[in-house]
Image (cartoon, helix red, strand yellow):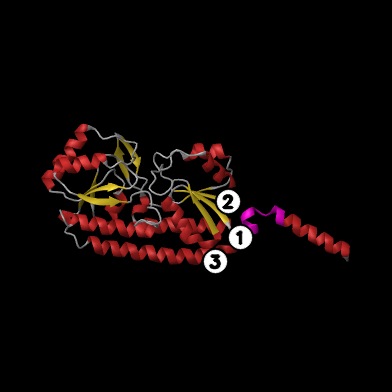
Amino acid sequence: MKTLFRAGLLGLSLAACALPAWAQDKTLNVVASFTVLADIVHQVGGDTVAVRSLVGPNGDPHVYEPTPQDAQALAKADVVIVSGLDLEGWMDRLITASGYKGKIIVASDGIVTRRMEDDGKEITDPHAWNSAANGVVYAQNVTKALAAADPAHAAAYQANGAKYEAELKDLDGWARREVATIPEAKRKVITSHDAFGYLGAAYGIEFRAPVGFSTESEASAGDVAKLIDQIKHEHIKAVFIENATDPRLVQQVAKASGAQMGGELYAEALSTEDGPASTYAKMFRYNITTLVGGMKQN
């Protein structure tokens, strides 16, 4: 009997050693590429998930330079989640450097994408999360990924995901009502770069910017001059900077056109915890409120 008991303990010990670390301490280690995505993971995963965002608050995911610590985080990750649509051009190099062999979850799978010209090339707009309806798709993909990686907590993830999706759907309806208070002719906005195309298409706002989809692009003098003439001709007053980009070009455009700066928008990075956009839902609500306030001045 003692021999059988010791054998049983040994078997349990070996089985425990065979389990991944997160299964033993009941924490799933997730690495997300940037803060918006990390917050979606947090909302769905709750306390069962430890999520790290590679790009931090107010960071620019287009031009991010990974660190050795990022590679270490990927090497220890149970799940890695990216937005996709060519947003994280640096991710493949980081994955190779880290030695991560697990599955890469693309949170934007299923999104109806926008194709536009940028610097003479047709590319896919990567900023899909700026529509709350697309945020629902992100949440659904995250829920599926967490449930598949941690079946023991699948029911909790699915419940959290359903609640969060309902919140985002409510935000989508609220945004449509808010924007509808602005006459269509006044729904025109100038921003730092072309990051709000999905928001514009979803809610009927016309966005213009001196720089294209990526902050790596550079605006030509001719493009800037043309934009200034448009602002003057159409009497656009709603001009905004973005938290993760250099504000100087937009400030120059506003000064040259006579427009007034309407505040700061959060296009592709959350604020710090003490800021107005510390979660994806707060970011979306803040952006819509700020945009509506600016468009009232047009």
The residue lying at 14 percent from left, 40 percent from top is: 229
Quadrant of the image occupied by residue 219: top left
Residue 166 image-quadrant placement: bottom left
Residue sitting at x 30%, y 53%:
199
Q: Nearer the viewer, mark 3 or mark 1?
A: 1
Q: Nearer the viewer, residue 270 or 116?
A: 270
Side of 17 where 160 appears, left or right: left
The location of residue 128, given as percent across then percent down, is 36, 50
> Residues under labels 2 and 3: Cα distance?
19 Å
Q: Which residue was labeled with disc 1?
A: 26
Sequence-wise first label, 2 or 1:
1
Q: Are marks 2 and 1 in contact (CB under 8 Å)?
A: no
Residue bearing the label numbered 2: 78
The rendered magenta stretch, by its main secondary structure, is classed as helix
Relative depth, front residue between 18 and 265? 265
Mark 2 or 1: in front is: 1
